[in-house]
Image: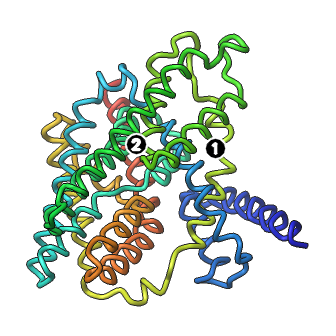
Amino acid sequence: MDQALPLITLGVLFLGGLAAEHFGRVTRLPRVTLLLMLGLVVGQSGFGLLPDQSADWFEPISVVALTMVAFLLGADLTRENLTQHGRAIFFISVMIVIGTTLTVWIGLSALGLHPGLALLLGAIATATAPAAIADVIQQSGVRNGFTETISGIVAIDDVWGLIVFSLCLAAVNPSDDWSGPILNAGHHIGGALLLGVVIGGPAAYLSGRLKSGEPLQTEAFGIVFLTAGLALWMDVSFLIAGMTAGAMIANLASHHEYAFNEIEQIEQPFMLLFFLLAGASLELDALRALGWVAAAYVGLRVLARLASGSIGAWLAGVPKEERHLYGIALLPQAGVAVGMALVAAETVPQWAATILTVTIAATVVFELFGPPITLAIIRRQDRMVNEARQQAGE
């Protein structure tokens, strides 16, 4: 019976996820939101239908799923894409991280929150949800300059966010070892970049060699699991490691056209379980405790994304009609923000309750409502492009 229950649970989750995905096609709702809501219903905040041990599945599944997403995001950082969209990716990502930090910090401080606590919440607000955004882009079926730029921004903005968070943590927690957070961030980011290069270089050459021009599923599994496992063992960011390895393979594997077909084929079961279990882990109690601080945090983050995304797009020379779309398309927020909150709570325990409550409550809001907004923005931009082409043709 001990072995039967997990298998039955996984079977039901897969079939339930399949039904949610089909419902998403019919209703045109993002499958991310539907899977999260299904997980919420069957999880502890809902009817509590999942076995207790299912909570232990979330971490390993999320690591594998997010590493796959990181590889696919890194695959968009090719020389061709960076030549076409690199300026927009750089300016928009940097401005969103800086603008979000400053807007949330100044806004919450003006409302009476301690400036140090407000600064940490501002840094945490920079994080996005790469898995949710990548899944929405894939579901939309839209592949153009806008979605390529969004993918590139998502691939690197958490790097800037981690750097800013480490600097803010060092600023609000001056001690004899004030350099600790900065050195820790350097280890997480620098070590991940090095790991990605070490894995991505040989993988770019070896991929597709056993069967000429065709990467194998075994290769995909091996590279993804090796990257994720070594990143955990080295205590570095598996997201950045996967992204770096993906970019290396995409730029160096010239002996076949596309190195990531197999990862796209195998990622869906992992992503389905990831979103279902992520939904099951959402805590509605945090929403019930949503006070003015969390409500202000949500509002300020939305405002910051709109304003700073537009400024970054303006600096990058993005067409005027698209400038206001980038920031609002990057609303989803998930695991990276919670990870930052846990580090901040451990470092400054006197603010731990506020940091964790605000972050978890905002994560519920942005994970449930962010993907539909992202999907709507992508479809709107695609319609604008098609209408412009039709008018040009006339």
**Closer to us: 59 or 128:** 59
Q: What residue is rendered at 29% in x and 72% in y? A: 298
Answer yes or no: is residue 299 visible.
yes
Q: Residue furthest front?
A: 176
Disc 1 versus disc 2: nearer the observer = 1
According to the picture, the residue beneath numbered tag 1 turns out to be 267
According to the picture, the residue beneath numbered tag 2 turns out to be 383
Q: On the picture, is 388 further left or further right than 48?
A: left
Q: Residue furthest right?
A: 1
Q: Position of residue 156 (x, y in %)?
A: 33, 42
Q: Amino acid at mark 2?
A: Arg
Q: Quadrant of residue 302?
A: bottom left
Q: Secondary structure at mark 2?
A: helix
Q: Position of residue 196 (x, y in %)?
A: 45, 32
Q: What residue is rendered at 53% in x and 41% in y? A: 230
Q: Amino acid at mark 1?
A: Glu
Instruction: Give the answer, above or below, for where 271 lies relative to 105.
Output: above
Q: On the picture, is 115 further left or further right than 265?
A: left
